Image (cartoon, rainbow, N blue to C red):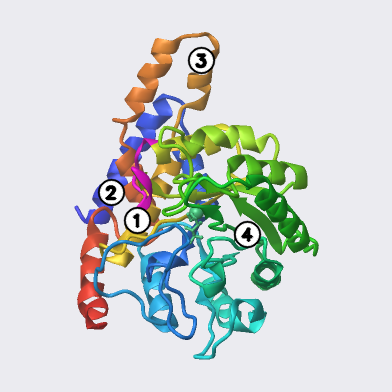
Amino acid sequence: MTKSETVTKAFEAAKEEYARIGVDVEAAITQLDNFPISLHCWQADDVGGFETPDAELSGGGIQATGNYPGKARNIEEHRMDVEKSMELIPGKQRLNLHAIYGDFKGEKVDRDQIEVKHFQSWIDWAKGLGIGMDFNSSMFSHPKAADDLTLSHKDKGIRDFWIEHTKRCRVIGAEMGKQLGSPSIHNIWIQDGSKDLPVDRYTHRAILKDSLDEIFGEEFPAAHLKDAIESKLFGIGLEAMTVGNSEFYLGYAVANQKLICLDSGHFHPTEQIGDKISSALLFVPEILLHVTRPIRWDSDHVVTLNDDTLLIAQEIVRAGALDRVHMGLDYFDASINRIGAYVVGTRAAQQAMLFALLEPREMLLKYEENRNFFERLAILELLKTKPFGAVWDYYCLRNDVPVAQDFITEIQQYEKDVLSKRS
Ligand code: RNT
Ligand code: ZN
């Protein structure tokens, strides 16, 4: 038997087995096909970006650790790496770009000067690939962010600089959405906070609220732009207080009907963002997720198919919210092959979605409503040994991407041919 015959045969058997507990595998696959994952551009170069002069991630309470060779040094290499990664991932993806990744062509363009023209080549690139794009204002790695205060700074000059930057980012995001025929989600995350206990939290939060009001003053069609705001518990060097904490942004998002962005690394370690989805959905129009894997802190390790990722996927599916929850990834591991990081992490997120879509919904609900809790537990445990892998492999085969471990050799080859030649 050829490999594709083996995979198909295993899939047919799996389909029957799932059908026996009332799961329609084909329907699950169709739903997965329509659920794009937004790939964060910043895994390819450790959150460096393409500003002139060459910048590196600095401050902001976030850190990319590791020194694995081969990171993308310019926009051409970056696009090549993202394309290579996308070739090895099944299903639909989008690209999530940060403002510092503009096509500045060696020119020094400060953040309050960026325009659509600096991103037109990205839009054209995305159009060529037939994918949508999301966007982020970049309020870190900049002299005007050195105080760890941006939109909430008491200095009006600094604050206005970042307000201008973010206003421009929304214009650029809206243009991306318009040209690509798919709304772009613009996300605001700021590092603003304080290392030691401050005496004035209130004013900084009041200022941040005013800055956001000013930023959101301009309206864009929902078909072009969606606004998201991202909360955080703490950052490195900013342990005592974060201006934009969960209460702040959730309050703001509810009051102004913005998207709340939930990042799996931005809460206390025993909290799971999967649990927050159904609550937020009742009060905000849509949710943006930054799926990541925090180890002991917001370490942004590559996403894996662990309990946290699974719960996120299960809660999206169980809440019937595949069209209201947008899944973006947000990790940056500089210690391993970066294309490998993209492929493993994105596949894990998709696998979580597929696993969740293969749940026998009716049966589980019935058990739960009848308080048959051992039975519910038994089925949830049983699902772990169902032939999930056979469905996944078939999904890859059908999408014409490497099946099972085959992507490993492809990435090794790319490292040999391309990455190892970058000094
Ligand atoms: C930082 C936030 C934020 C960034 C990216 C680069 O803690 O998670 O989303 O990771 O915007
Ligand atoms: Zn994030």
Q: Residue at label 3?
A: 368
Q: Are marks 1 and 4 in contact (CB under 8 Å)?
A: no
Neighbour tally class for label 4: few under 14, some 14-19, many 20 plus, Cα within 10 Å: many
Residue 189 visible to an observer of this rendering: yes
Which residue is found at the position 60% from the left and 33% from the top? Answer: 278
Q: Nearer the viewer, mark 1 or mark 4?
A: 4
Badge 3 marks a residue whose secondary structure is helix
Q: Residue at label 1?
A: 397
Mark drawn on residue 185: 4
- Specify the amino acid type for callout 1: Leu
Query: Residue 279 versus residue 319: which sits nearer the camera?
Result: 279
Mark drawn on residue 7: 2
Q: Nearer the viewer, mark 4 or mark 2?
A: 4
Q: Distance between the residues labelled 1 and 3?
A: 36 Å
Which comes sooner in the sequence, label 1 or label 4?
4
Mark drawn on residue 27: none
Q: Distance between the residues labelled 4 and 3?
A: 36 Å
Q: Nearer the viewer, mark 4 or mark 3?
A: 4
Residue 357 visible to an observer of this rendering: no
User: What residue range appears in magenta?
Assistant: 296-307
Q: Is mark 1 within 8 Å of ligand 2?
A: no
